[in-house]
Amino acid sequence: MMNLIQSVERALKILNLFDDYTEELKITEISNRLKLNKSTVHSLLKTLETYDYIAQNTETGKYRLGLKLFERGNIVLHHLNVRTLARPFLVDLSRDTGHTLHLVILDGMEGLYIDKVEGTSGMIVYSRIGRRVPLHSSAVGKVLAAFQSNDWQSKLLERYSFFRQTCYTITSGAQFQKELNRVRENDYAIDSEENERGICCIAIPIKNHLGRAAAAISISMPKAQFEEQPLENVLGKLQAAGLSISRRLGYLDKKAHL
Amino acid sequence: MMNLIQSVERALKILNLFDDYTEELKITEISNRLKLNKSTVHSLLKTLETYDYIAQNTETGKYRLGLKLFERGNIVLHHLNVRTLARPFLVDLSRDTGHTLHLVILDGMEGLYIDKVEGTSGMIVYSRIGRRVPLHSSAVGKVLAAFQSNDWQSKLLERYSFFRQTCYTITSGAQFQKELNRVRENDYAIDSEENERGICCIAIPIKNHLGRAAAAISISMPKAQFEEQPLENVLGKLQAAGLSISRRLGYLDKKAHL
DNA sequence: GAACGGTGTTTGATATTATCAAACTGCGCG
DNA sequence: CGCGCAGTTTGATAATATCAAACACCGTTC
């Protein structure tokens, strides 16, 4: 098909190594993990450093991610003005309910957290801006998938692997298809311990001018609280916020043809 | 000195092209600007795209920055926990005063915006998270430079170019040195139309355990408002916030030896 | 204080690999 | 229909990334 450039690939693989490691990496560790010669890694690192994509700790000699990534990342973010539109709503919803709110967009076959407002309850939610979340086991994922075109959904179902996260996770394409249809009808999605034990979420779509989901907002809470109060309490507030944001994005309330 | 890897350099230069251009770029435009062969650029772009650092608009064929940068950028951000510490203070200060607040860190010989809270007054401040600001013409820049080591300052003054931004900009090393000494004594800095006509700023340092500036916070307002009310009104609030954040970073109130 | 194990760094011969021009495809427009 | 202008693919060529090995440095250990 296509010839990728080896050295660039390797450079990007180096950047990707820092995925879960907030810690700094030694040059030898990088070369071991990527099975590359130490001096090759060194050249790559020095190139990345020159352009500020990597920085070296002058004390220890170890390497860490550079500030350029941060700078460039925020330019990307600027494209996604959904975030600035949504933020005040997330803040309000979090204050009203005490729970944690997330804003998530679709990226390939995953959801990508682009904003988060922590609740006051202090419940720990395993998420972070920039992290990813599966489509089949999360409320936001279901919403994002539900409001895409039928063609997109078919392609997704062909390729997707429904790995199990908890004992409640949806693990078949047929089940997921039914769930998506239900989400389209209801205009919201539920995750009841399907992604993480003890945690339940409600999510609603942010729709664009085509009626597709440009993003999804979710509220996360412990199972107990989710069960003891009626769904409508919080769902109404979520949907009101979702509609306001969607309208500002150009959504026109019409029935979308997906 | 050192051999950088050409193809990686070129790939990073492509990413850097998107600096001020939120618009998408055509492959031919990229090759013109970097004076590279079209097919070379194509290979580079496809490699970057495979790793999600570049994305192609399927409609127009044009290229834009990819979401991976956003993801990686937020990992960098996570390192800088100054931001999470400072944010609530910025929000409060903005609500109290109605003005725009900025959080800036030192990166090389420039300031780098890492957070911003817009004021309610609706005044337009030309800044954005990820953007850079000169050290010699901004209040935050003066603060960041003032609270570094003497060695660092000497090196800065040797190399720095004091370009003019407005008719009030400091344009000589001697002047700047005097200004830095004043900032060290007062523990705050002023920018009165030195960076942008009509805009004045007050900035204070966030200090680390060594007494160095880990970051700076500034408040921006129109010249008229800056002149009509006494400085102390807002300066006191800023300094209180600065001290709280500095203490959480390990600052111990002692006189630093810089 | 000499030898060791651990860093990151530099070197230079080698063949792999990125590069370029040119040809190709596909789209929109007159 | 044919022109112009996109992005893409091709393949010969030479430049360039790569590797192993040697180097320099810093602590530790004997």
Image: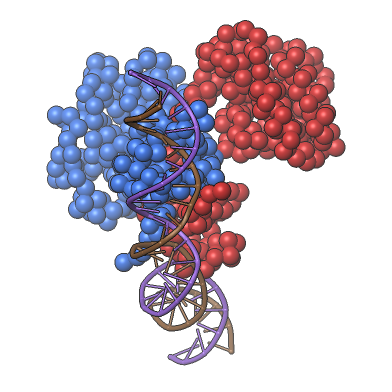
Chain colours: A red, B blue, C purple, D brown
Q: Closest to the observer: B109 or B35?
A: B35
In this view, the residue in front, B86 or B76, is B76
Left or right of B92? Residue B165 is left
**Figure label count:** 0
Quarter residue B176 falls in:
top left
The residue positioned 30% from the left and 41% from the top of the image is: B33
Question: x and y percent of residue B216 in the render?
Answer: 37, 37
Asked whether B40 or A215 is in front, the reply is: B40
Q: Is residue B251 visible?
A: no
Q: Position of residue A112 (x, y in %)?
A: 61, 34
The answer to whether residue B203 shows anywhere in this view is yes
- Residue at image point 28% right, 34% down: B139
Relative to A29, residue A186 above or below: above
Residue at (45%, 19%) from the top-left corner? Answer: B95
In this picture, residue A57 sits left or right of residue B164: right
Q: Nearer the viewer, residue B77 or A253?
A: A253
User: Is B187 placed left or right of A152 in the picture?
Assistant: left
Residue depicted at 19% across the width and 32% down the height:
B165
Q: Where B252 sits versus A44, above or below?
A: above
Percent x, y of residue B211: 38, 48
